[in-house]
Amino acid sequence: MSVSALAKALRVSRGTVQNRIDKLVEQNVLLGFTVRTTPEAAAHRVRAAMMISVDGVHADDVLKTLRGYPEVRALHTTNGRWDIIAEIGTDTLESFDEALRRIRMIKGISNSETSLLLSTHKL
């Protein structure tokens, strides 16, 4: 929410809200700010969830390797059928195809299944 919108909702001046935010930053209560965009406006327009099965002794190495891939937006370890779920994001289908090829070649990955994310319904 913008400072102006906060001020209006709180029925105080914009300066009051800005001063309070500045004070909270100074006191290390607020550690940072973020921007949220719609999936359509963001880079990495091709998005997917890649479920990965890993040979047990290679789990740490696979996670370490995946962290080095810029296409991997997030990694989740799981307790179900799959050991890791990787969120993948690229700008084109061609770069997506290349990323999948490289990820599938990582030593220790025994199986994977990938689904394209078509739309997001709740942020």
Image (spheres, grey):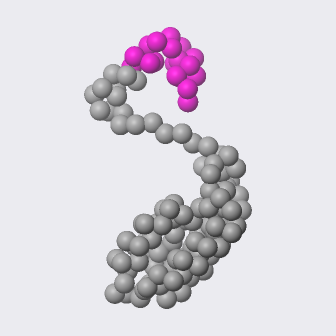
Percent coordinates x, y for residue 91 in the rendering: 65, 59
Q: Which secondary structure is most common in the magenta stretch? A: helix
- In the image: residue 59, left or right of residue 45: left
Q: Looking at this rendering, what residue extends furthest in the left direction?
A: 27
Q: Residue at x 68, y 54 (%)?
A: 121
Q: Residue at x 44, y 13 (%)?
A: 16
Res. 12 visible in picture:
no
> Which quadrant of the view contains residue 114?
bottom right
35 vs 119: above or below: above
Percent coordinates x, y for residue 27 in the rendering: 28, 28
- In the image: residue 122, left or right of residue 107: right
Foreground residue among 29 and 72 = 72
Percent coordinates x, y for residue 62 in the rendering: 41, 77
- In the image: residue 11, left or right of residue 41: left
Q: Residue at x 54, y 39 (%)?
A: 35
> Which quadrant of the view contains residue 98?
bottom right
Magenta stretch contains residue 10: yes
